[in-house]
């Protein structure tokens, strides 16, 4: 299917979901974010790039089904990373923020969280508490599996993590 054939229905489906979906679609349009379907590692649902694009894994999704709640929530997740910027997105703090908006949005569409770990994760405060962010890592790996490499990311966005490592604050 040509990109033009599925792009607009995808954005329209996002807009129909409410405020967060409409804001996500607006961001994608205004920033001209490229969204593409591409085969990727099966552990990946979607991904953002530093070139301000998003790829959706064809191992899980097809352009013909642009109303899939998980697909729509993954777009919300990846757009959140683009909004955060590189340094925040590449941290446990940034992932917690994106996972919470992702799964709370998905719950608004389906009426439930996909697993108890996600429900607990979505109940956590978004803060710079190191113990809570370490627990966040554990919850994410319990849900996504050990192949989810959250343990490679710093807990805080890099400048803050460096400052913490140097000063202990």
Image (tube, grey):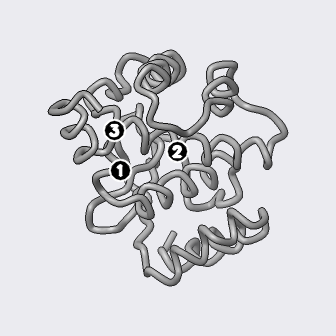
Where residue 12 appears, as percent x and y from the top left, is 70, 74
Question: Which residue is painted at 25% across and 34% down in the image?
Answer: 164
Q: Which residue is mark 2?
A: 97
In the rendered image, the quadrant that contains the C terminus is top left
Instruction: State which tag comes first along the sequence, 1 or 2.
Output: 1
Q: Secondary structure at mark 2?
A: helix
Residue 33 appears left or right of 28: left
**Front-most of residues 53 and 140:** 140
Q: Which mark is residue 88?
A: 1
**Front-most of residues 27 and 147:** 27
Q: Are marks 1 and 2 in contact (CB under 8 Å)?
A: yes
Badge 2: how crowded within 10 Å, few (<14), some, or many (20+)? many
CA gap, disc 1 to disc 2?
A: 10 Å
Residue 94 appears left or right of 49: right
Question: Which residue is painted at 41% across and 58% down in the image?
Answer: 84
Q: Secondary structure at mark 1?
A: helix
Is 70 rendered above or below residue 146? below
CA gap, disc 3 to disc 1?
A: 7 Å
**Front-most of residues 119 and 128:** 128
User: Furthest residue to the right?
Assistant: 111
Badge 3: how crowded within 10 Å, few (<14), some, or many (20+)? many
Q: Secondary structure at mark 3?
A: loop
Q: Which mark is residue 156?
A: 3
Question: Which residue is painted at 19% across and 30% down in the image?
Answer: 165
CA gap, disc 3 to disc 2?
A: 12 Å
Badge 1: how crowded within 10 Å, few (<14), some, or many (20+)? many
Is 60 rendered above or below residue 168? below
Report the number of numbered marks.
Answer: 3
């Amino acid at each position: 299917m040509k990109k033009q054939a599925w792009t607009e229905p995808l954005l329209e489906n996002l807009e129909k979901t409410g405020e967060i979906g409409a804001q996500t679609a607006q961001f994608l349009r205004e920033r001209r974010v490229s969204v593409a379907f591409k085969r990727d590692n099966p552990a990946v649902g979607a991904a953002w790039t530093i070139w301000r694009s998003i790829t959706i894994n064809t191992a899980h999704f097809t352009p013909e089904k642009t109303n899939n709640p998980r697909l729509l929530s993954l777009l919300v997740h990846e757009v959140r990373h683009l909004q955060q910027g590189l340094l925040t997105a590449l941290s446990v703090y940034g992932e917690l923020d994106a996972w919470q908006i992702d799964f709370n949005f998905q719950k608004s569409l389906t009426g439930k969280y996909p697993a108890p770990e996600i429900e607990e994760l979505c109940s956590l405060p978004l803060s710079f508490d190191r113990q809570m962010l370490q627990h966040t890592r554990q919850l994410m790996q319990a849900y996504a599996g050990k192949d989810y490499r959250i343990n490679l990311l710093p807990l805080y966005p890099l400048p803050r993590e460096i400052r913490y490592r140097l000063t202990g604050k």
